[in-house]
């Protein structure tokens, strides 16, 4: 008997196949080893014989088939032959080979990446895999670390703070969790690890987490050294500027010419502001970015001490920007507040308010007073040509790629600077 399926699978017609030896569909290698006879014996002894092997089509091509050979019995339970069922599994074999090859290549890559610690862990934090880089960086052999809690790689402080739990939670929410922190080697020594944690998924199932990190201790120490040097430099600049401020103040007191006294006093105020900025900076833990609100509040407190006739208030929510841009914003506030001190209340003192409102894209910085206001024909460009202070403001606004507008608030004036959050 030869079915239509057998003809489609193996290429023989029933007339060509019936009466031929079953061995014709086996490979030459299997024929030499007597594979067809072995299957028949197995089926006779055990009632069935399963096999997965190469078979040969009529045209000589091969197919990987999953087969089953069983005894064929008549009504009297006498064995009168055998029946063989085959299923073409060539495509699945090729897919399996592709997957196996990919896994072997991936394993080779992981084992070759000795500069990176690469390991996986389950939802509870138990380590599942461990590459050669992890062994080199952290000191543990694969056999002694697999199955142990990954928290042993964290410092006691980080364990208590739930650092691994945070990495897992962030990785699940955002797809990855970047982290830089101290980790602990097998010998108890610490190193600065720069790493990334990602969830491992197969279709809709989460299998655990993949963590990749490298020993970045040298860079971390270099960054710390640079921070120390920058703070020291900022501190020295501040001291030098304070010396200049003192010399300008002495010159201002020494002259009897009102215009010269005014110019020297203005210069003293500007230099003192820059000195105060550097004093604020060298005390910060991060020199790359700074909280603009805290920075300007500190500046306003200092400016308020320079005038006993005015009340200066500040209001604003925290927002971090690059330090260089914060310095420029602070110098704008210094000039606008100083101008308000001089011109907003000619007959006495009054209130001046500094506020900042920040969004994801823009910072709105406002200096407002309740004074006499500006003339009806006031022109900002014309004012910047006549006033050094406004020229400074316009230059700073241009450097920040910001926008300066004047609003008449009746009473008083509000100068609004809109600064992009990013440079």
Image (cartoon, rainbow, N blue to C red):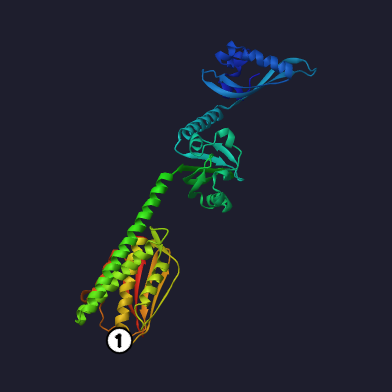
**Dot 1 crowding, Cα within 10 Å, few <14, some 14–19, many 20+:** few
Q: Is 286 in front, or is 97?
A: 286
- Residue nearest the viewer, comparing 192 with 257: 257
Q: In the image, residue 136 lies at what x, y percent? A: 48, 36
Per the image, label 1 sits on a secondary structure element best described as loop
Q: How many marks?
A: 1
- Identity of the residue drawn at 53% across and 42% down: 188
Q: Is residue 289 above or below residue 97?
A: below
Residue at image coords 31%, 89%:
347
Above or below, 216 relative to 132: below
Residue at (58, 10) in percent of width and height: 32
Identify the image quadrant of residue 305.
bottom left
Horizontal side of residue 174 vs 334, given as left or right: right
Residue 421 visible, this orientation? no
The answer to whether residue 362 is left or right of residue 31 is left
The percent coordinates of residue 216 (x first, y second) are 43, 44
Quarter of the picture containing the C terminus is bottom left
Compared with residue 187, is residue 267 higher up or lower down, i.e. above or below? Answer: below
Q: Nearer the viewer, residue 31 or 109?
A: 109
Q: Disc 1 designates what residue?
A: 346
The single residue placed furthest to the bottom in the displayed view is 347
Quarter holding residue 257: bottom left
Spot occupied by residue 231 in the image (x, y as percentages of width and height) = 36, 58
- Please name whichever residue, 420 or 286, is drawn nearer the observer in this view of the structure: 286
Quadrant containing the N terminus in the rendered view: top right
What is the x, y in percent for residue 422? 37, 60
Does residue 54 sit above or below 420 in this rendering? above
């Amino acid at each position: 008997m030869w079915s239509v399926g057998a003809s489609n699978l193996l290429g023989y017609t029933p007339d060509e196949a019936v009466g031929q030896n079953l061995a014709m569909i086996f490979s030459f290698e299997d024929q030499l080893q007597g594979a067809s006879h072995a299957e028949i014996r197995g089926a006779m002894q055990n009632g069935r014989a399963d096999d997965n092997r190469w078979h040969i089509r009529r045209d000589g091509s091969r197919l990987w088939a999953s087969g089953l050979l069983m005894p064929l019995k008549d009504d009297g339970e006498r064995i009168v032959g055998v029946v063989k069922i085959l299923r073409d599994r060539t495509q699945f074999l090729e897919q399996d080979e592709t997957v196996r090859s990919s896994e072997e290549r991936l394993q080779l890559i992981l084992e070759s990446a000795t500069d990176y610690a690469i390991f996986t862990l389950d939802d509870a934090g138990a380590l599942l895999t461990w590459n050669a880089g992890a062994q080199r960086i952290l000191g543990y052999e694969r056999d002694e670390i697999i199955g142990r809690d990954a928290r042993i790689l964290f410092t006691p402080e980080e364990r208590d703070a739930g650092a691994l739990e945070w990495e897992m939670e962030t990785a699940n929410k955002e797809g990855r969790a970047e982290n830089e922190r101290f980790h602990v080697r097998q010998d108890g020594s610490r190193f600065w690890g720069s790493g990334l944690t990602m969830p491992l998924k197969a279709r809709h199932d989460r299998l655990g987490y993949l963590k990749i990190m490298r020993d970045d201790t040298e860079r971390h120490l270099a960054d710390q050294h640079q921070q120390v040097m920058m703070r020291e430099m900022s501190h020295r600049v501040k001291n030098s500027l304070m010396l200049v401020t003192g010399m300008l103040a002495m010159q201002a007191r020494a002259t009897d010419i009102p215009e010269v006294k005014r110019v020297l006093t203005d210069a003293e105020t500007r230099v003192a502001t820059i000195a105060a900025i550097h004093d604020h900076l060298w005390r910060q833990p991060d020199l790359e970015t700074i909280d603009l609100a805290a920075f300007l509040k500190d500046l306003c407190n200092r400016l308020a001490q320079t005038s006993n006739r005015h009340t200066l208030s500040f209001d604003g929510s925290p927002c971090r920007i690059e330090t260089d841009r914060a310095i420029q914003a602070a110098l704008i506030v210094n000039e606008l507040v100083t101008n308000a001190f001089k011109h907003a209340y000619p007959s006495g003192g009054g209130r001046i308010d500094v506020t900042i409102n920040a969004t994801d894209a823009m910072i709105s910085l406002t200096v407002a007073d309740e004074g006499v206001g500006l003339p009806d024909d006031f022109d900002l460009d014309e004012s910047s040509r006549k006033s050094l202070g406004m020229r400074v403001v316009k230059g700073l606004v241009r450097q920040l790629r910001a926008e300066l507008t004047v609003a008449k608030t009746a009473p008083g004036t509000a100068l609004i600077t809109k600064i992009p959050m990013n440079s």
